[in-house]
Amino acid sequence: MTARPLQSGPGSRILDTLVLAALAVLVWQGLYEYAGDSAITSPLMTLDYAAALLRTADFWGHAHATLVAFAYSLAISIALGISLGLVLGLQRFAGDVAEPIFVALYTIPKVTLYPLILLIFGLGVSAKVAFGVIHGVIPIILFTLNAVKNISPVLLRVSRVLRLTTWQTVTTVLAPAVMPELITGVRVGFSLTMLGVLIGEMFASQRGLGFLIINGISLNNVRMTTAVILIVVVFAIAANSLLLALDRRMHRG
Amino acid sequence: MNVASPAAPAVSDKPAHARLSGVTRVFEGKLPVHALGPLDLALARGEFFSVVGPSGCGKSTLMDLIAGLNPPTAGTIIFEDKPVVGEVPDGIGAVFQEDASFPWLTVRDNVAFGLRRAGVDAVEIKRRVDYVIGFMGLKDFTAAYPAQLSGGMRQRVCIARTLVLQPRLILLDEPFGALDQQTRLLMGDELLRLWRETGATIMLITHALDEAAMLSDRVGVMSARPGRFIETLTTGWPRTRDSNIVAEASFGAVTARLWSLLRAESLKAIGADSSGAAAPEAAAG
Amino acid sequence: MSRKAAIVVTRIAVIVAAIAALEILCRVKLISPLTLIPPSQMVAVLWELLVSGKITDDIVQTFSTVALAFLLSVAAGFALGALIHALPRVRRALDPLLASYYAIPFFVFYPLLIALFGLNKIPLVVIGLVFATAAMVIATLNGLDRVPRVMQKTARVMRLSGARAVLAITLPSAAPYLFTGLKLALAYAFIGVIAGEFILSGGGLGFSIAYAYNNFDSQTMYALMLFVLLVVTVVNGVLHVIEQRMLARRAGR
C-alpha cells in the first residue's frame, strides 16, 4: 500500500476543523483578556463552571423545563408542518397560492408577533411552545411542499404501469422520494424551534435555560451566563451535526 | 480519396501553421494519468482538419494544448513559428462544447465582447460586429438574450464572438454535440462557408464520423488513451463542398474507413475506462 | 384568466379575506380588544403615529442600525466568500461550521454582547452581522461555484488577465446568486436587529413594541407591529421580484 500524503483524506479534515476550533477558543480568550471578568469568562473558567453546573439539580430543573417545552414544540411543528406541506404540495393550486405567503412569513422578524402570542397564551409553557412552533413550522412546511411538488411525474407513471395500489404507491414510491427533503426541513425546523423556545424563555419565563442566561446578566453572574450559553451552543451543534449526518445519508441513498 | 498510411500525418513542404512534436500530456495526481501522446501533428495553413477518436482518448486535451490553455508535459508546440508555452497566443479562437455565451449580455454585446476588451474603437467594433452578425444569420436576434435562443443559435453566437476577433486558427471542440442531427448538418455547412470566407485554419474535434468525413480536408484518427494518431485520412474534397458531398461515392468509403479504424480503438477505450487507470492495468479482470 | 393570474388573484383574495375576518371578529368582540385590535384601527393609529412624527426617531434608529449591519455583512460576506472559495482546504475545514451555523441560537449571545459593548447599537449590529454575513458567504460560495468552467476557459482564450476576467466574466456570471445573498442578508439583518431591540435595548421599533406591550398600550403596539410587518414584507418582496427576474433571464443555465 502506497503512503498517502497528509493533504488528502478525512484525517486531515478533522485536523483542519480542530485547528479552527482552537482558533475560536483563542479568539474567545482574547476577548476575555480585552473585556475582563465582568463581561465574559475565559474558556477554561467557563468549562470549569459548566462542568460544575451540570452536576447541580437546579440546572437540570431548568434544562428539563426547556427540553419539555422544546419536545412539545418540535412534535407540533413536525406534525403540523408535514401535514400542511403534504396537502399544499399535492394540491398544486393551493400550494402555488400559499407558498409565497409562507416565504414572506419566514423572513419577517417573528419577535414582532410575540406580544400577540403572549396575549393569547399568557406567560408560561404554552407561550414558549407557541414561540417554538411559529419559528419551526414554516421551514418544515416549505421543504415538505417543495419535496412533494418536485416528485418526478415519471415516478407516478411507473407506479401505474406496475399496477401498484395507492397505498403501495405512497409508501414504496412517494414516501422514499420525498424523505430526503423532508429530513432537511425537519433539521432546519429543529434548530429554529429550539431558538424560538430559548428566546421565549429569555423574556417571558421564570424557568428554563433561556431564563438562566438572562437572569445571569441581571444578577451580574457572568459565569453562569457564559457557561449556560456554552452548554446550549454545544448541544445545538451536536444535535444539528447528527441530523446533518442523517440528512446527508438520505440524500446519498 | 487517398489514405496516408504512416502513423504521423504527412508533412508537406509548406511551413505548418501549427506544429506539435513529440507532445505528451500527463496529469499529475494520486495516480498520474497519461492522457495524450507522444504525438506529432502539423496543421497546414488554411486547411480543415478534423480529429476523431474514442471517448476519453484525449481529444479535448489536444485542443487545450494547442490553444495554450495547458502546457505539454513533454514536446513542443509551435504556432506561427513561435512556441506556445502555457499562454494563449494571439490569433487563436476557440469554441467549446458547452454553451459559453454570456447570459447577462444581449447577442450583440456578446459578439462585441472581445473587441471591447481589446480596446478597439467603437466605429470599427460596430462595423465588424454588424458584418459577423449578418454573416452568422443572427441579424433578427441582436437584442435577444441567450436564454431566449435555441442551443444552435447560442453556439452561433459563440462562433460569431470568436470570428469577430479574426482568428487565424479556429479550434472547435464538439461544438455541435448538443444539437440534433438536422441542425448539425446545417451548422456544418455554415462552418464550411465561414472557413471559405475567412481563410482560417480550422481544427474540429468531433465524435460524429460523417461530420468529420464530410467537412474536412484531412481527418486524424486517435487511438484510445493515451491518445496518439494511428492514421490520417485525406479526403480530397474540393474547397467548394457542402453537406451534399454525402452523395459522393467516396464519402461512404471514407466513413467506412474511419469506423473500421475507430471500432477497435473504441472497444479498447471501453475496456480501459472501467478501471479508470491507464490502459495496460485494465487488462487484468 | 390564465393560471398565473388566477393564482395571484386567489392569493390576494385569501389575504383580504383573512384580514376581513379578523376585522369582523374584533368588531363583534369575539376577539377581546385586550388581545387584538381591529386591523382598521391598527392602520388608523399607525397613520396618526407616522404623521405626528412620534415614531420617526424609532424608525430612523432601527433603519440605520439595519442598514449598517446589512452593508457591513454584504461587504464582509462577499470578501470572505471569495477568499474561502479560493482556498479549497480552508473551505473543507469550514464546511461543518457553515452547515451547523444557523443551528446556533445566536440570540443567546445578546447578554454577553451587552456586557462586552454596553447597551448601545453595537450589540445589535454585531448580532445582525453574525446572522447576515454567513448567508452572504454561503451565497457567494454558491455563486462562484456555479460559474461554468467553460466561462473561465473562454476568458483565457480571449486573453483576459486575472482581475479583468473576474470583473468581465466571473462576477456577472455569479450575479443572480450574489443577489440572493443580498436579499437574505437584508432579511437577516432585520430579524437580528429588531429581535435585539425587543429583548434588550433602549430604542428603536423593537423596543417600542416591547415598551407598548409592557404598558398595555395595545393601540401603539399593534400599529408598530403592523408597520414592521409591512416594511419587511414590502422590502423583501421587492428584492424577491428582482431576484426572480435575474434568474429568469438566465432560464435554464
Image (cartoon, helix red, strand yellow):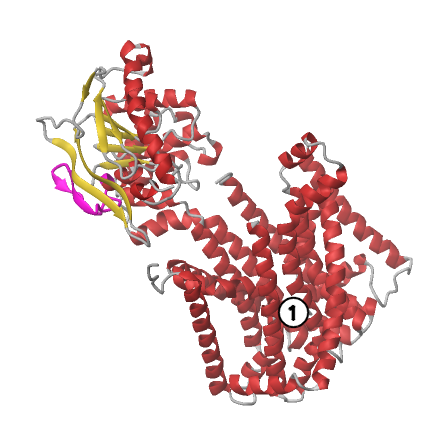
| Mark 1: few/some/many CA within 10 Å (<14, 14-19, 20+) | many
Residue A189: x, y in percent? Answer: 66, 60
Q: Residue furthest left?
A: B13
Q: Amino acid at mark 1?
A: Ala
Snapshot quadrant of residue B41: top left
Residue B126: x, y in percent? Answer: 31, 33
Look at the picture and state if A11 lies above or below C19. Answer: below
Query: Which element is circle 1 on?
Result: helix
Q: Could you tell me which residue is drawn at 37 percent across and 44 percent down? A: B276
Q: Mark 1 sits on what residue?
A: C195
On-image quarter of the N terminus of chain B: top left
Q: Over which residues does the magenta segment extend?
A: B66-88
Snapshot quadrant of residue B75: top left
Snapshot quadrant of residue B109: top left
Residue B221: x, y in percent? Answer: 26, 28
> In the depicted view, which residue is nearer to us: C59 or A205?
A205
In this rendering, would A134 be left or right of B242? right
Residue B68: x, y in percent? Answer: 23, 43
In this rendering, would C5 be left or right of A249? right
Look at the picture and state if C164 lies above or below A167. Answer: below
> In the depicted view, which residue is nearer to us: A242 or C193?
A242
